[in-house]
Image (spheres, rainbow, N blue to C red):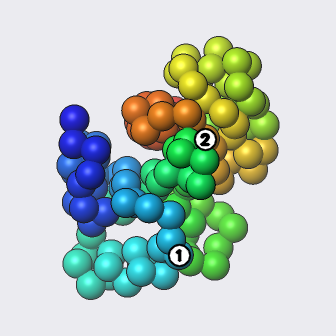
Amino acid sequence: MNHNPKPCNAKAVHPSGEIIKLPCYCPWKEHLFELEEEKKVTPLPKYALFADEKGNWRIQAIPLTPASFENRKALPAAWRGERDAALDTVSGIEGCIFVHAAGFIGGNKTYEGALAMASKALELD
């Protein structure tokens, strides 16, 4: 599996093209929206994956606009507010750390786990 695709090559991360991987955390929302408009991206990505400062991985739902609190696709309602082993159980994915109660961000101990969370989230809700 390619762990270092270019952030704009979403199909290298997931065949749907709806999950992007950032090479590191940085202010990305404005730039993503500019690229989407410039490149006429379809389908629009729903989730961004990036490593946090501790080496864990985050899955962030992409907002409707850079300043919006509404997301293109929030993380599944059943996962929201869950942590650790309880989240592993409800999601069926190992290594989960949390999903925020609002469903805009979550975490996993590994890239593969974060990608599994994003992939499954695309199918749910």
Q: Is residue 80 above or below residue 23?
A: above
Q: Which residue is mark 1?
A: 27
Question: Which residue is nearer to you in this view: 72 or 3?
Answer: 3
Task: State the CA–CA distance, disc 1 to disc 2.
Answer: 18 Å
Residue 91 location, x and y as percent? 59, 23
Residue 17 location, x and y as percent? 28, 52
Residue 29 location, x and y as percent? 50, 74
Residue appearing at x 57%, y 53% in the figure: 52
Number of other residues with Cα within 10 Å of mark 2, as a class: few under 14, some 14 to 19, many 20 or more: many
Q: Is residue 76 visible?
A: yes
Three-letter code for the amino acid on which mark 2 is drawn: Gly
Are the residues flagged by discs 1 and 2 in contact, CB closer than 8 Å?
A: no
Residue appearing at x 48%, y 81% in the figure: 30
Residue 78, quarter of the rendered image: top right
Question: Which residue is nearer to you in this view: 49 or 3?
Answer: 3
Left or right: residue 75 compared with residue 30: right
Residue 51 location, x and y as percent? 50, 51
Q: Quadrant of the C terminus?
A: top right
Q: Quadrant of the N terminus?
A: top left
Question: Which residue is nearer to you in this view: 22 or 45?
Answer: 22
Number of other residues with Cα within 10 Å of mark 1, as a class: few under 14, some 14 to 19, many 20 or more: few
Q: Is residue 16 visible?
A: no
Q: Earlier in the sequence, mark 1 or mark 2?
A: 1
Q: Which residue is mark 2?
A: 107
Residue appearing at x 50%, y 64% in the figure: 25
Three-letter code for the amino acid on which mark 1 is drawn: Pro
Left or right: residue 13 compared with residue 116: left
Residue 15, quarter of the rendered image: top left
